[in-house]
Amino acid sequence: MFNIAAALADLRGQYDFDQLQDILRQIRREHLAEISPEVGINELFQLAKQRNLIREDEAGNFHITVDQAA
Amino acid sequence: MAGGSSRPNLICLGNGLNQSRILGFRSPRCSPQMITQGNTLNAVTPGRPFVIRDPVHGYLVAAVHERALVDHPVTQRLRRITQTGLAEYVFPEARTSRFVHSLGAMHVASRFVLASLENAELDVALSFFAEIENYVGRYSGERETFEDLLQQEGTLSALASVRSSFKYPQLSEKKIRQLMAVTEAGLRLAALFHDLGHLPFSHDVEYALQDYAAQLKVEARPIPNSLMAIAGDEAPHEEIGHRLAELAFRSLGTDTKPSVKAGFEMATKILNSKNPSYGLRKKPRASALQWLHSLVDGEIDADRADYLLRDGQALGLDFVHYDLDRLVSNLVLIEDPELGFVTAVKETGLAALESYCLARSRSSQVFIRHHKVAQSAAALRHSSVRGFAHPLAKSFLDLLTALGGDGENAPDDLLKRFSVFDEAWWLQVLRSVRQEKNDSLTDACLSLVLERARSLRSVWKRKGDLTPQQLIDLNSRADNFFSSGNGRMILAQKRRQLLEKGILLNVFKFKPYTIREESKQSVMLIKGKYRVEPASMASPLIRNVISIWQEDIHIYAFVERESILTLDEVVDAIVKD
């Protein structure tokens, strides 16, 4: 089954929102067989946020903070 | 003034001759300059704006440069793409096309942008136009030519900017009027082309394309990266549409005036700019372009503003009507420190916004989530996956591969090839699928899609068919699919499990409006005399639309008519892991 932490593990770093959306879009393509078409990048974004895999700083940038072991 | 005449050309949608008589048009306008295209009359005289009689908005006017795009085969294809898929199997008059909807959205987009800027405070409007000036910077030496866009054709003009009436004198200066004109010109084209890439029958065949691509991946079969770039996208029709729009602008843009080229470029920028995602981020700080994008694809946008009225009228749903004029006249652009440029509604327009929200929610409830509409959609999606595997679909997949690639293809060739992939073509593909040996569920789906046979059964039709606990469990499951932990990841898996049992699923992720994650209030804003606040705080009615929605059914299941599966068994199969 698709594991978003594993998918983000190698992508730690700082991104602006557009870059983050592109990353999630690419992840979604790569895992198309496991992610239903109805589940879009907004849902992936919310999932990653809920799991503290990404956080938004005061400047509006996003940090992928996945433990390498994920 | 192009054409040198104040008399507009006329396109009458529907039965043009009869309508033109009813509407009192004199014969010179409908003949002898008219040629027949299907049941529509097109004026043949080039170089003038033209007028379209529309049952929703009255008269729509298209500028000369817009006409070349409206007449393009890739746009005309939208006449043969229905707005509401197979909803006509339940609501027989639901036959509105994406063509007329696109024209309507173009018309409404003009009204939205002009009203929002006319109502804006001076500093906000100046800040907006400063950004727009940057975007059209390379035309700085030619800005005078933007004046072309403001030329009025007699009593009619396509661009509402001609009639702009800013309360601040600084905004009536020539430079601002020119920037306003090019902004509006770009936004209108973005609205005209916002649905250009829709597949036949729109969303359900689009889901089928994604299901088909997923199936190829599961089976480890080769799929070109360029096809995956489109089929694997969240919204393939947007990806396709944006590429087609760029090709169309490129194909027409070689000998056009600088003002029109600037309009094409602005439209491309608006279409390609990312949605501001006001609800997802603490500080989206939407740019001017992103705000313009939100006027075509946002909370209060020209797309929705048009289709709610148009579909409501076609379906005979009087209760989805809302006061567009009052809503438009109260739109205002504001610049929020966190949200950036964002649309608000003046408090005097609150009642119109309330009816707009209700119209949207009720439309989804009564029309999109009608069990038979949902059933037809599920059947179309299921059988269309087989359609994409059929040899007849190869030419379409090849075209998507070409569109998704970076290779240089002749724009005219790609546009021309895309223009033939309409609903008649897709039905022919499905008829060919039917000639082959299929499993019984696929055959049942094809019978429904092709003949509206009563070959499928909705396991439940309305809330009363379920026990209160079953409704809670199902809606909890539907919510789980989209908004919690692993739920999002198991929908695809669950769909495959259910299919093995002969059960088709339709799950709705519609929400009445977007809620900001931080505040849990609506993204839509109300601008009062002293403060700006979320519409969900200002209006108990808007706040409670969410509660009404939460109590509806969000998930339906369908089986073959002769299936012996019971309601309890199907509910269990859905809710249990």
Image: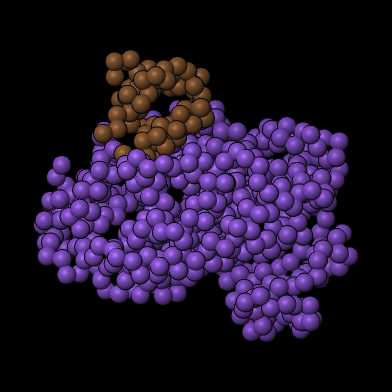
Chain colours: A brown, B purple
The number of callouts visible is: 0
State the quadrant of the N terminus of chain B: bottom right
B468 sits to left or right of A49: left
Above or below B450: residue B377: above
Occupied quadrant, residue A27: top left
Q: Where is residue B447, by image quadrant?
A: bottom left
Residue at the (72%, 61%) spot, across then down: B67
Residue located at (79% from left, 48% from top): B254
Residue closest to the eye, B232 or B529: B232
Tell me if I can see residue B294 in this picture.
Answer: no
Of the 4 image quadrants, the one containing the C terminus of chain B is top left
User: Is residue B155 visible to us here?
Assistant: yes
Vertical relation: B349 (above or below) B533: below
Q: Is residue B107 placed above or below B287 in the rendered structure?
A: below
Question: Horizontal and vertical percent for residue B399?
Answer: 55, 51
Q: Position of residue B232 (x, y in %)?
A: 44, 42
Taking the spot 62% from the left edge, 73% from the top edge, the residue there is: B13
Tell me where residue B322 appears, x and y as whole percent: 48, 61
The residue sitting at 57% across, 46% down in the picture is B402
